[in-house]
Image (spheres, rainbow, N blue to C red):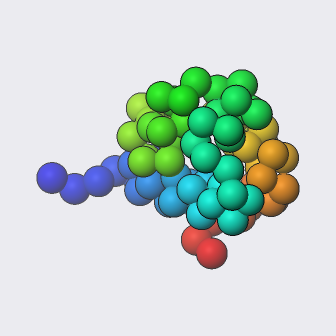
């Protein structure tokens, strides 16, 4: 089975979020708490298992906490 574009995008976003989270030395739990997102949803985001796309407001919150631009979260770096 092939991955859809949304699945590929979600996977890339998840990889980027995990990368920048680890650079800040945050756990998934800490980032989830700081962004007011459940731990299970944060885990789904990072693993690329979100149904549909991650919303812009959620990505914005994450980018602000991680102190990176949105384009660093959504583009191949």
Q: Among all residues in the image, which is located at the extreme bottom?
A: 77
Within the image, what quadrant is residue 18 found in? Answer: bottom right
Left or right, 7 with reference to 66: left
Question: Does residue 1 appear in the picture of this structure?
Answer: yes
Q: Nearer the viewer, residue 37 or 55?
A: 37
Identity of the residue drawn at 69% across and 65% down: 23
Identity of the residue drawn at 84% across and 46% down: 64
Identity of the residue drawn at 15% across and 52% down: 1
Identity of the residue drawn at 51% across and 60% down: 15
Q: Is residue 45 above or below residue 73?
A: above
Quadrant the C terminus occupies: bottom right
Question: Does residue 10 appear in the picture of this structure?
Answer: no
Q: Nearer the viewer, residue 64 or 33?
A: 33
Q: Nearer the viewer, residue 41 or 30?
A: 30
Residue 45's spot in the image, x, y percent? Answer: 51, 41
Q: How many marks?
A: 0
Q: Is residue 7 above or below residue 41?
A: below
């Amino acid at each position: 089975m092939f991955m859809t574009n949304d699945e590929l995008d979600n996977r890339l976003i998840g990889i980027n979020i995990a990368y920048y989270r680890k650079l800040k030395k945050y756990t998934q739990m800490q980032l989830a708490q700081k962004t007011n997102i459940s731990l299970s949803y944060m885990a789904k985001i990072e693993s690329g298992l979100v149904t549909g796309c991650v919303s812009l407001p959620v990505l914005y919150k994450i980018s602000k906490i991680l102190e990176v631009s949105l384009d660093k979260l959504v583009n191949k770096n």
